Amino acid sequence: MSNQATVSDIFRRALEIRQQNQNISYKDIKSRLVSEYSGKPFPSPSKLTIPEYDNVAPEEDWTAGLPVVLRGIQTEDWNEVAHGIIICLEQVENYPKQSGREDDPNKEWRDRNKGIAEAEAKNLSKWMPEELMAMAQKSVGKK
């Protein structure tokens, strides 16, 4: 088995560096990654992925740095690889703070159903036969 790190390994290392020092800058994390991985084999582009963070941010955000990582692998430039990892790290850390997510404990939860409840009820009563509507209401009542 080789000592070739995967992109996921490098991302987890960036998270580990952050956990060790919450006040460290992204620039310093990047520098540490570059110094730790320089001279080592580059990750395989066939495993260009990081752990999933769908519960934290949309996929297009937490994977935003992967094209930069790929470019770094292709050009064999650890600065580019680390830069792409930092983009992903920034998204994972900052998206919840900036998005106003519903599960953010500092935000008051908003009821998405509130704005559509009347239209939904009107459409259901119009298109759903009374027998089906009664069955649906009955099954909801059992839960």
Image (cartoon, rainbow, N blue to C red):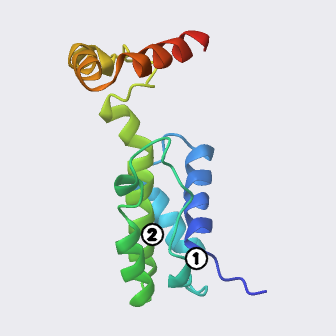
Residue wearing tag 1: 37
Mark 2 vs 1: CB contact within 8 A: yes
Bin the neighbour count of mark 1 within 10 Å (Cα to Cα): few under 14, some 14-19, many 20 and up: some
Residue 30 on image: x %, y %: 45, 63
Quarter location, residue 3: bottom right
How far apart, in angstroms, are the residues tagged by discs 2 and 1?
A: 9 Å
Q: Position of residue 70 (x, y in %)?
A: 41, 79
Where disc 2 sits, the SS reads: helix
Q: Nearer the viewer, residue 36 or 74?
A: 74
The reply, left or right, for residue 4 in relation to residue 32 is right
Question: Can you tell which quarter of the image residue 64 is in?
Answer: bottom left
> Which residue has dot 2 on it?
82
Which residue appears at 50% of the width and 75% of the height? 48
Element type at mark 1: helix
Left or right side of 106 for 43:
right
Residue in the picture at 55% in, 9% down: 141
The residue lying furthest to the right in this view is 1
Q: Which mark is residue 107?
A: none
x 29%, y 22%: residue? 124
**Place of residue 89 in the rendered image (x, y in percent of width and height, measured from the top left):** 45, 53
Vertical side of 7 occupied by 107: above or below: above
Q: Give the mark nearest the N terminus, 2 or 1.
A: 1
Q: Is residue 81 above or below residue 129?
A: below
Q: Is residue 106 something that shows in the picture? A: no
The amino acid marked with disc number 2 is Ala
For the C terminus, the quadrant is top right
